[in-house]
């Protein structure tokens, strides 16, 4: 309640404050000294009554012209004097009442103020109620009009009282034409029959059935429509609300979802690969039968098991599943060892994908893996067959290389047998001389000495002794050469173990080159440049297979580039060196080279430029896979007609993958 008094030093008159204070504590008095302060108070509080206490006519006029009375709070004016004209002016401006100052001023002002406050609050409450009712009516109309549900209000006889726009749209009806018409008449017969509609609309006094029913009909275009039908009593006069929700798309999606779920379940249960779902905390939430077979556990028992029990980390490196759960790193085609429930470990190929939530948060992972035991065994067999095939190609050269020393060893042995016969006669003569000397008879000594000298001259003892020693040395050298060839061949053909070992790469390269040299030495000049190398943790036999494939291919490329009848020879250069924390091995040839269109496919399995039957196309592919498994890389550069250069890089750290198995490249 505001009070204004600009015409006196005290802008709030004491008699006015005493009169208004009689109203009670539920009314707060807010004194104001001018119009602007009154406006400020009206902006902060809900004003019920404004009292203009003996203000000038100009002030009264400015108050009624201001914004504070536009929200229609009541204004009571106390004129400054008992003037009829000033009271009339106040009423013309819109004052609710005027109170003159007199003997009963205090009682009259309190009564007038309470009455005006009561009237104002009643008016305000009625306006608020009317506004709320209008808002609720508008809201209800909007809901009924816009809700995607066909609504019909039925009377006790089940005739239509009202329908909403959705009902009109769904059944192509007009509300003016259906009012008072029985519901069975306006709805399609198949829809009424499919849901037994009248059971949902029982007579007054009977309870409505629980839940909803599905109703079906065929529209004019031939498509089936499905409705969820529900009913509800509205009042005690028998009115019922009938609601039909079009669930055609929902039912289709539900049916389709069920089909997809069954399809996915059949696929998951039938695939040969193991499939497993892991929660964010690392526990198994789902596994298909194949996963149970590989892990050695029934799939039902795997649920709730910690995944680390079967996929332990390798050294300090986490398993692929731990990486995808921790960092969301997707992996494809990785290989690792898996621990089985029955004990032992088997090699597997595994792909992992993170399960992401709405904000990209990792909620789990999916793992698909396969048992590679049989594949690894087949790959080892293929690798061994490749070795034996390479040895088969070298057989003729190796046989020639062995036959040469065997031939001169045999000739030397025959010669040494003859020399041994001559030496036997010489030794017999030496024995006769020795006996004569012991007897001490000069004539016998002289005869024995002459016979010994004659025998020495006859067998050419000095030449025999020299040639015998030479033949013996040549035979020893030949046998040593044969021993080296056999040793290199045995090392190369050996299948090798599953464990890695520290090896001298130069020795691996050189022993392989010695074997290949036996078949190429008549048409190839072999140059070697070996630098000092640190020992490398590797599979030596597998690396020898790589070097064998590269050298044999280089030899074939040289044969292809040079006419067999020409005297020209090709050159194969082998070099080794340390580079970038690893070892580099280069094999360069002056052969036919590789066509540009074949460079991208040279390491593909079964790719070969040789005639049918002349090659399997697995040599370089196998070699590429071996180098990859050692953590290295193999590259090739070539210019047709000018040879090719294969470069192998093997890192000193990392070494072969933990499963110690070699696979062919997928590139």
Image (spheres, rainbow, N blue to C red):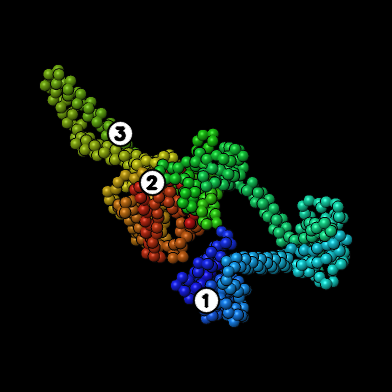
- Residue 153 lies in quadrant: bottom right
Sequence-first tag of 2 and 3: 3
Mark 1 vs mark 3: give the one in front.
Answer: 1
| Horizontal side, residue 425 vs residue 538: left or right | left
Residue beneath label 2, please? 655
The disc, 2 or 1, on the residue closer to the chain's N-terminal end is 1
User: Percent from the top left, x then y, of residue 402?
Assistant: 37, 43
Pinpoint residue 569: horizontal percent, then vertical percent.
34, 59
Q: Which residue is mark 3?
A: 417
Above or below, comparing residue 618 to residue 493 in the picture? below
Quadrant position of the N terminus in the picture: bottom right
Mark 2–mark 1 CB contact (< 8 Å) = no
Could you say which disc has been placed on residue 300 in the image?
none
Task: Read off the residue under disc 1.
Answer: 55
> How far separated are the C-alphas under marks 2 and 3?
56 Å
Q: 53 or 349: nearer the eye?
A: 53
Residue 112, x across and y down, in percent: 62, 68
């Amino acid at each position: 309640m505001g009070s204004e008094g600009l015409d006196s030093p005290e802008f709030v008159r004491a008699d006015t404050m005493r009169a208004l204070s009689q109203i009670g504590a539920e009314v707060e008095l807010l004194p104001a000294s001018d119009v602007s302060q009154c406006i400020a108070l009206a902006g902060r509080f809900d004003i019920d009554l404004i009292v203009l206490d003996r203000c000038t006519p100009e002030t009264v006029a400015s108050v009624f012209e201001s914004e504070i009375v536009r929200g229609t709070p009541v204004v009571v004016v106390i004129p400054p004097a008992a003037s009829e004209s000033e009271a009339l002016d106040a009423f013309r401006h819109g004052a609710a009442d005027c109170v003159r100052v007199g003997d009963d001023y205090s009682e009259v002002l309190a009564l007038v103020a309470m009455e005006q406050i009561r009237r104002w609050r009643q008016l305000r409450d009625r306006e608020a109620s009317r506004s709320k009712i209008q808002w609720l009516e508008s809201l209800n109309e909007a809901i009924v009009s816009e809700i995607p549900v066909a609504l019909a209000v039925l009377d006790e006889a089940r005739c239509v009282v009202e329908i909403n726009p959705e009902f009109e749209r769904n059944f192509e009806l007009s509300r003016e034409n259906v009012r008072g018409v029985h519901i069975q008449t306006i709805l399609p017969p198949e829809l009424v029959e499919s849901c037994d509609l009248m059971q949902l609309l029982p007579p007054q006094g009977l309870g409505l059935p629980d839940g909803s029913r599905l109703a079906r009909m065929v529209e004019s275009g031939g498509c089936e429509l499905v409705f969820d039908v529900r009913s509800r009593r509205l009042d005690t006069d028998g009115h019922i609300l009938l609601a039909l929700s079009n669930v055609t798309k929902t039912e289709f999606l539900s049916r389709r979802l069920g089909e997809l779920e069954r399809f996915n379940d059949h696929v998951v249960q039938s695939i040969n690969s193991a499939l497993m779902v892991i929660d964010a905390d690392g526990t198994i939430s789902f596994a298909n039968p194949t996963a149970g077979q590989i892990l050695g556990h029934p799939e039902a028992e795997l649920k709730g098991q910690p995944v680390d029990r079967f996929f332990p980390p390798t050294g300090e490196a986490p398993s692929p599943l731990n990486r995808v759960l921790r960092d969301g790193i997707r992996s494809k085609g990785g290989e690792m060892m898996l621990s089985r429930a029955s004990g032992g470990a088997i090699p597997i190929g595994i792909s992992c994908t993170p399960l992401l939530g709405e904000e990209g948060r990792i909620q789990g992972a999916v793992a698909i893996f396969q048992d590679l035991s049989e594949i690894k065994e087949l790959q080892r067999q293929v690798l061994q067959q490749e070795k034996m095939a390479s040895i088969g190609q070298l057989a003729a050269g190796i046989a020639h290389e062995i036959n040469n020393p065997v031939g001169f060893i045999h000739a030397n042995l025959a010669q040494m047998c003859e020399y041994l016969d001559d030496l036997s006669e010489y030794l017999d003569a030496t024995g006769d001389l020795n006996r004569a000397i012991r007897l001490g008879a000069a004539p016998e000594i002289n005869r024995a000495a002459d016979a010994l000298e004659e025998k020495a001259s006859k067998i050419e003892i000095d030449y025999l002794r020299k040639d015998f020693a030479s033949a013996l040395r040549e035979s020893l050298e030949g046998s040593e050469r044969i021993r080296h060839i056999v040793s290199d061949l045995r090392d190369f053909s050996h299948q090798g173990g599953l464990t890695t070992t520290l090896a001298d790469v130069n020795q691996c390269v050189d022993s392989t080159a010695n074997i290949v040299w036996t078949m190429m030495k008549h048409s190839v000049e072999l140059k070697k440049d070996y630098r000092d190398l640190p020992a490398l943790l590797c599979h030596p036999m597998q690396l020898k297979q790589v070097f064998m494939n590269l050298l044999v291919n280089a030899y074939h490329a040289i044969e292809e580039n040079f006419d067999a009848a020409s005297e020209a020879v090709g050159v194969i250069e082998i070099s080794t060196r340390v580079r970038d924390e690893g070892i580099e091995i280069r094999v360069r040839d002056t052969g036919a080279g590789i066509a540009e269109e074949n460079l991208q496919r040279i390491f593909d399995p079964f790719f070969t430029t040789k005639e049918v039957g002349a090659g399997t196309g697995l040599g370089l592919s196998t070699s590429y896979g071996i180098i990859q498994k050692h953590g290295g890389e193999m590259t090739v550069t070539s210019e047709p007609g000018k040879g090719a250069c294969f470069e192998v890089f093997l890192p000193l750290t990392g070494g072969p993958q933990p499963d110690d198995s070699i696979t062919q490249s997928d590139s």
